[in-house]
């Protein structure tokens, strides 16, 4: 699919500090205390380019288990709280632990076990890093859509689909969505439940987002067929498809993203446990992106082919952004107004074959320079492609079958989608080739006019297609955010 030129989730680079984030847990308590600053909210942040450490609302830092949890409300209206919650570390206890290690050192060689560092409250607190304290709101005051759509790309991701258990109908589905919404809101705020596993006990919310959607089959199982949107009709077959039906579709779909792997896993486990006897796991996939702050300055991320991936993504500042990405207020299915449709594709990259290609060949396949993502017609990454420019040989500088040319909105009657993918690596295949590629996720108001239109054209002549294998697929209706004191999907399930 459009692996490169419709971008990774908000396209323009997020701005943030580029210095190292303040360490969590084993930090030196003499480190300066910082103010993470206001949370601009996903609509005002630029792009899912690779950021420096993010700015955001400092969320409540977790306390040791014996201490009752207290919560500081996130900043609203761009105002940071007067005092940041902190993760407290005792310097005296840390030094005492190191001193006791003495002759043996911090790592015990024979047994291979590491000596832990004690956490206490004897000295002044050290703040959570900006990375850990950043909170994504479960429901934005100025946005109707769920988190995880315009939210900047996170470093870790999980995609999971469930099927309702036999006998579980509309009422059971409503109870499940109520549980899931409550859990997501608590975890995204950095709060743990009473029966929490403690996996993410030492971390802040770390930009956690949890997004819920409904598959085509959900409506038949719940007796809601007449409320199923036509936009959820199954995607057509494409010649490049080699789809495993066991790893696609599903009644319910959940997308989880966070900038900390333990925080993301913690949310995944909580969602799975909440499913109980109501829904059964159908498939699950894990992904990753470059970590915030990994580059010297904010920049568009790269995919596993080494290409700058995400240059032409629609931006929230575009005048037609909402029209392209979100269902409008006049849509026939009222419960989907303000929501969006997610297309999910597991695309394996034939990296051994790709990496054998000379640099010039790779660049002509994509239509952009590998070093900086600039079009072959010149300029920098953000310079518009000159699709009419010919070289001295009279041929187009950007080849007719280049991926960037075929996927461009100008080549597809203006069709565009918001790409927000994760890379994946699931080990190696029997032939030794990496089982790796892209968990492609795109968002649009109408899949037929966006994904399907572009993919049909790519299917007919994209030079990149010979290096890709589409192995799983799903299409989901993602309703708007829950109303205050409500849950995601409530207007559908109780309407």
Image (tube, grey):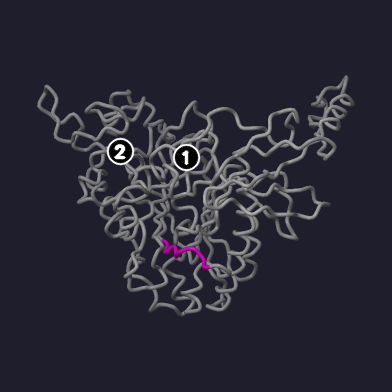
Please state if 416 lies on the left or on the right of 301 as rendered: left
Residue 271 percent across, percent down from the top left: 61, 60
Residue in the picture at 52% in, 50% down = 285
Q: Residue furthest top?
A: 103
Q: In the image, which disc is placed on residue 436?
A: 1
Please state if 387 lies on the left or on the right of 20 as rendered: left
Residue 2 percent across, percent down from the top left: 33, 44
Residue in the picture at 61% in, 43% down = 261
Disc 1, SS:
strand
Disc 2, SS:
helix
Mark 1–mark 2 Cα distance, whole angstroms, equals 16 Å
Residue in the picture at 54% in, 49% down = 257
Q: Which residues are magenta?
A: 476-483
Please state if 101 lies on the left or on the right of 212 as rendered: right
Location of residue 254 with respect to 122 vertically, above or below: below
User: Is residue 213 part of the magenta span, yes or no?
Assistant: no
Location of residue 490 with respect to 117 vertically, above or below: below
Q: Foreground residue, 29 or 462?
A: 29
User: Is residue 479 part of the magenta span, yes or no?
Assistant: yes
Q: Residue furthest left?
A: 394
Residue 361 percent across, percent down from the top left: 28, 27
Location of residue 257 with respect to 494 vertically, above or below: above
Mark earlier in primary sequence (1, 2): 1
Q: Residues within 10 Å of mark 1 (few under 14, many from 20)?
A: many
Residue named by callout 2: 464
């Amino acid at each position: 699919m459009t692996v490169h030129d419709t971008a990774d989730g908000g396209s323009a680079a997020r701005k943030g500090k580029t210095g190292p984030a303040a360490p969590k847990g084993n930090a030196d308590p003499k480190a300066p205390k910082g103010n993470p600053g206001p949370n601009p909210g996903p609509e005002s942040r630029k792009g899912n380019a690779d950021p420096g450490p993010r700015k955001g609302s400092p969320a409540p830092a977790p306390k040791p288990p014996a201490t009752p949890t207290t919560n500081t409300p996130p900043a609203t209206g761009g105002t940071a709280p007067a005092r940041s919650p902190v993760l407290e570390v005792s310097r005296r206890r840390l030094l005492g632990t190191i001193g006791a290690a003495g002759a043996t050192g911090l790592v015990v060689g024979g047994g291979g076990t590491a000596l832990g560092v004690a956490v206490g409250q004897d000295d002044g607190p050290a703040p959570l890093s900006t990375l850990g304290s950043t909170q994504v709101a479960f429901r934005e005051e100025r946005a109707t859509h769920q988190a995880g759509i315009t939210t900047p790309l996170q470093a870790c991701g999980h995609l999971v689909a469930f099927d309702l258990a036999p006998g579980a109908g509309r009422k059971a589905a409503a109870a499940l969505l109520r549980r899931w919404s409550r859990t997501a809101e608590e975890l995204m705020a950095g709060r743990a439940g009473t029966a929490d596993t403690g996996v993410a006990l030492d971390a802040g919310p770390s930009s956690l987002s949890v997004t819920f959607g409904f598959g085509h089959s959900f409506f038949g199982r719940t007796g809601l067929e007449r409320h199923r949107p036509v936009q959820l009709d199954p995607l057509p077959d494409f010649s490049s498809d080699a789809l495993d039906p066991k790893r696609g579709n599903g009644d319910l779909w959940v997308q989880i993203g966070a900038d900390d792997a333990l925080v993301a896993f913690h949310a995944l486990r909580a969602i799975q446990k909440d499913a109980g006897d109501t829904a059964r796991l159908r498939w699950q996939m894990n992904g990753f992106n470059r970590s915030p702050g990994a580059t010297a300055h904010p920049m568009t991320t790269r995919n596993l082919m080494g290409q700058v991936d995400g240059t032409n993504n629609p931006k929230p500042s575009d005048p037609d952004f909402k029209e392209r990405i979100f269902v409008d207020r006049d849509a026939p299915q009222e419960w989907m107004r303000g929501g969006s449709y997610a297309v999910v594709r597991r695309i394996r990259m034939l990296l051994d074959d790709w990496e054998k290609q000379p640099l010039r060949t790779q660049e002509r396949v994509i239509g952009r320079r590998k070093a900086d993502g600039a079009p072959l017609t010149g300029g920098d990454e953000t310079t518009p492609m000159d699709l009419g420019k010919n070289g001295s040989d009279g041929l187009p500088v950007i080849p007719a079958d280049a991926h960037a040319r075929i996927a461009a909105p100008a080549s597809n009657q203006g069709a565009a989608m918001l790409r927000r993918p994760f890379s994946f690596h699931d080990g190696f295949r029997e032939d030794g080739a990496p089982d790796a590629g892209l968990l492609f996720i795109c968002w649009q108001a109408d899949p037929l006019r966006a994904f399907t239109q572009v993919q049909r054209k790519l299917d007919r002549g994209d030079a990149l297609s010979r290096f890709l294998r589409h192995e799983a697929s799903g299409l989901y209706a993602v309703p708007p955010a829950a109303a205050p004191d409500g849950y995601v999907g409530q207007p559908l399930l109780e309407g």
